[in-house]
Amino acid sequence: MSKIKMQNKIVEMDGDEMTRILWKMIKDELLLPFVELDTEYYDLGLPHRDETGDKVTFEAGEAVKKYHVGVKCATITPNAQRMTEYNLHEMWKSPNGTIRAILDGTVFRAPIVIKNLSPAVRNWEKPITIARHAYGDVYKGTEYRVPTPGKAELVFTASDGAETFRETIYDYECPGVLQGLYNKDSSIRSFAKSCFEYALSTHQDLWFSTKDTISKKYDQTFKLIFAEIFENEYKAKFEEAGIEYFYTLIDDAVARVIRSKGGFIWACKNYDGDVMSDMISTAFGSLAMMTSVLVSPDGNYEYEAAHGTVTRHYYRYLKGEETSTNPIATIFAWSGALKKRGELDNTQDLIDFADKLEKACIDTMESGIMTKDLALIADGEAASVNTADFLNAIRANLEKLL
Ligand code: NAP
Ligand code: MG
């Protein structure tokens, strides 16, 4: 059998610990035997980030801009303990944060749904994708403890010093708390565009929710910017694609999501997205089955697993113990990137291969062969296997499909 060819490169970002081990196993077992993999390789493993003064992360982000498609392995975000463990020169920032800033993107997280892993919500049949606006709000807020009675005011001074708004927030008669939040039109616009683009690209309806009835300027601005961009740039494209955009209050959205069958994208403000994505992933079953893609408003895509480097399994692996780490979300990061590469280059055989790879994974799990994390929570008979045996079973199913 001749290998499938690629027209253009994918940016490959290697990572750390157990997921770095999985990365190589996935390439060796499921990709290299079938595809003439053409990647531009960046080693984002912590030792190499440290050696390059984190330059490699910035270069990888720029490369995704150039080739439009990237796939990333999970990476360590250093903390104090990692400083000593890896003898680091600096506590480097989160690579995901760096790449997100370069691409100005929005993160979409979607669960992989299989028949024998039923979601906590019985009527959910299809995945629910959360789009989180990962900029500003409470994550970049300024806050204090108010120690004594006194007046809190909201003051804005224009950069030319001329225009000033001043409004009393509260006249404190006792101690309390105070917080200032901000966001920017430019960031909300990028968020909106990424959401509309991703809805078109995955052929799903887009829901957006805020609390604009209470927050009549702040949340209202989000609502209006989404509405304006939809009217001017996406309405016709959505009609043509047969998909819908709809806005509703966050409370109403929560109720509708629970009653739904799934199969749509739910765009959320930063805090709502943080909380709701944990709710959705837990209700669908497992973090190890959650995929994640960073989409920029100008159409760059970076695929990864939502979970981390699975440190606890790695330490067991280093001791020579057998591990049963779930590679599914990392495989789907690869299949997502290959599929997108195929779509951008019009190479149907690459798209077909990615679809078959995903089907082989689902067939394997639905036949009851799973890693330990899933076997523990699956419906019906399930055999828990180690990672290598699991990948072999997927390969056997993939070969049947090719
Ligand atoms: P984690 O790597 O996601 O693992 C937490 C636990 O979840 C594991 O110990 C394991 O539970 C379970 N788990 C996660 N993925 C699994 C998989 N594929 N198969 C089986 N079980 C899985 O989170 P963490 O331990 O909090 O973080 C570890 C490192 O990852 C940190 O250095 C952090 O900075 C980094 N991180 C990176 C990213 C990213 O690059 N996107 C995201 C999050 C965290 P059991 O041990 O109970 O089996
Ligand atoms: Mg969270």
Image (tube, rainbow, N blue to C red):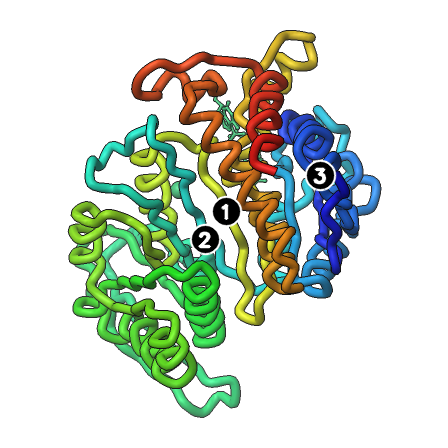
Q: Earlier in the sequence, mark 3 or mark 1?
A: 3
User: Can residue 324 be seen by looking at this rendering?
Assistant: yes
Q: Earlier in the sequence, mark 3 or mark 2?
A: 3
The residue that disc 2 covers is 108
Query: Is residue 350 rendered to the left or right of residue 273?
Result: right
Q: Quadrant of the N terminus?
A: top right
Q: Quadrant of the C terminus?
A: top right
The residue that disc 1 covers is 292
* Residue for point 49% across, 59% down: 106
Q: Quadrant of residue 88?
A: top right
Q: Position of residue 193 (x, y in %)?
A: 46, 71
Q: Nearer the viewer, mark 3 or mark 1?
A: 3
Q: Which mark is residue 34?
A: 3
Task: Classify 218 as above or below 401.
Answer: below
* Residue for point 45% across, 53% down: 108
The response on whether ligand 1 sits within 8 Å of label 1 is yes
Q: Are marks 2 and 1 in contact (CB under 8 Å)?
A: yes
* Residue for point 61% across, 27% down: 395
Q: Are marks 3 and 1 in contact (CB under 8 Å)?
A: no
Q: Callout 1: helix, strand or loop?
A: strand
Residue type marked 1: Ser
Q: Earlier in the sequence, mark 2 or mark 1?
A: 2
Q: Position of residue 99 (x, y in %)?
A: 63, 55
